[in-house]
Image (spheres, grey):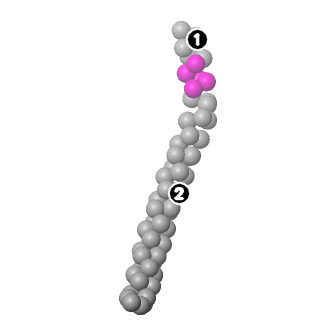
């Protein structure tokens, strides 16, 4: 029984759980920002290529 209590105290004092959670939240935020940047940049690049294609001579 004392072994179980000792393990419970060690688990509650451990900071590995919150650290892993913080890393997961940071990773999620990085992914959201990256997807937003890729989406914004992708539409601008698509527009630029469309304009170039339109401006090129056909013959």
SS type, badge 2: helix
The residue at 53%/51% (across/down) is 27
Residue 34: image location, x then y, percent: 50, 61
Q: Residue at x 50, y 62 (%)?
A: 33
Residue at the spot 43% in from the left edge and 88% down from the top edge: 56
- Specify which label sits upstream in the sequence, 2 or 1: 1
The x and y percentages for residue 36 are 45, 66
Q: Can you see residue 45?
A: yes
Secondary structure character of the magenta stretch overall: helix
Residue 57, compared with residue 8, is above or below; it is below
Quadrant of the rendering where the C terminus is positioned: bottom left
The answer, for residue 51, to whether it is visible in the render is no
Q: Which mark is residue 22?
A: none
Question: As rendered, which of 22 and 12 lies closer to the eye?
Answer: 22
Q: Is residue 5 magenta?
A: no
Of badges 2 and 1, the one in the foreground is 2
Residue 46 image position (x, y, % from top left): 42, 76
Q: Could you tell whether 53 is left or right of 17 in the image?
A: left
Q: Quadrant of residue 53?
A: bottom left
Displayed quadrant of residue 4: top right
Q: Which residue is disc 2 drawn over?
A: 30
Q: Which residues are magenta?
A: 7-11
Vertical relation: 10 (above or below) 16: above
Please tell me the numbered disc located at residue 3.
1
Q: Position of residue 29 (x, y in %)?
A: 50, 56
**Relative horizontal placement of residue 9, taking residue 57 as reference (left or right):** right
The one nearer the camera, 17 or 9, is 17
Q: Do the residues bearing badges 2 and 1 touch, measured as CB atoms within 8 Å?
A: no
**Label 1 environment density (alpha carbons within 10 Å; few <14, some 14–19, many ≥20):** few
Vertical order, 33 against 44 (above or below): above
């Amino acid at each position: 029984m004392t072994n179980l209590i000792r393990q419970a105290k060690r688990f509650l004092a451990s900071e590995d759980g919150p650290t892993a959670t913080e890393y997961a939240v940071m990773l999620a935020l990085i992914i959201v920002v990256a997807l937003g940047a890729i989406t914004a940049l992708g539409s601008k690049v698509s527009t630029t290529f469309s304009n170039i294609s339109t401006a090129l001579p056909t013959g």
